[in-house]
Image (cartoon, rainbow, N blue to C red):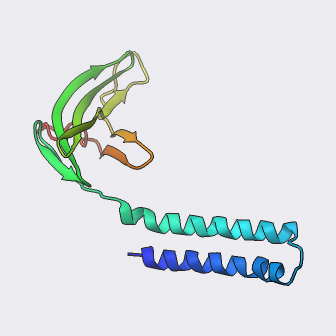
Amino acid sequence: MLTPVGATLALWIVLASLVDPIDRWRRGLSLSRAVIGMTIAHLGLATAVIALTTVQSFTTERDVALAPGASASAGGYEFRFDGVRPLEGPNYDGVGGTIVVTRQGAPVTVLTPRSASTGCSARRSPRPPSRCTTATICWWHSVRISGEGAGACASRSGRW
């Protein structure tokens, strides 16, 4: 929604930052380090403005709770939740899930979010897990599965 505003602002910053160097070049004046530094700094600001305002335009986000074997689609990907398994480490108990990600039927990756409770003493803590996240990131896309809250990763119904 704010992408056109951000793109316009970034274009304005680029054009305004190039006015002085181009004017100096046309008149045959030298470009001082201060003018070059100012221009580079403003071009960096324009890059930041366009990046910050366009990142949400190309983001797909869906909140779903999946039962084992259920699927959901988002951003051209299909997510199939294969279920949970108990995890036990030297100082924690938890659960781990398996989510298979496909695109047009071809496997992309397998995400394995985990959630654990840790204890400060020899006994395990009864406190519930609070968050689980897993991600896979490439230069052209990122896929992230995240759960929030005490029961987000392993509810009593088996849904995540």
Q: How many marks?
A: 0
Residue nearer the viewer, 119 or 65: 65
In the rendering, at what x and y percent does residue 44 appear? 65, 64
State left or right for residue 55 relative to residue 95. Answer: right
Q: Residue at x 38, y 15 (%)?
A: 90
In the rendering, at what x and y percent does residue 2 appear? 42, 75
Q: Residue at x 47, y 68 (%)?
A: 53
Residue nearer the viewer, 52 or 8: 8
Q: Quadrant of residue 130?
A: top left
Q: Is residue 30 above or below residue 144?
A: below
In the rendering, at what x and y percent does residue 111 appear? 29, 35
Q: Is residue 9 above or below residue 118?
A: below
State left or right for residue 147 relative to residue 72. Answer: right
Q: Quadrant of residue 136?
A: top left
Residue nearer the viewer, 154 or 29: 29
Point out the image quarter for the C terminus.
top left
Point out the image quarter for the N terminus.
bottom left
- From this viewpoint, is residue 105 visible? yes
State left or right for residue 35 relative to residue 9. Answer: right
Residue nearer the viewer, 23 or 99: 23
- From this viewpoint, is residue 64 visible? no
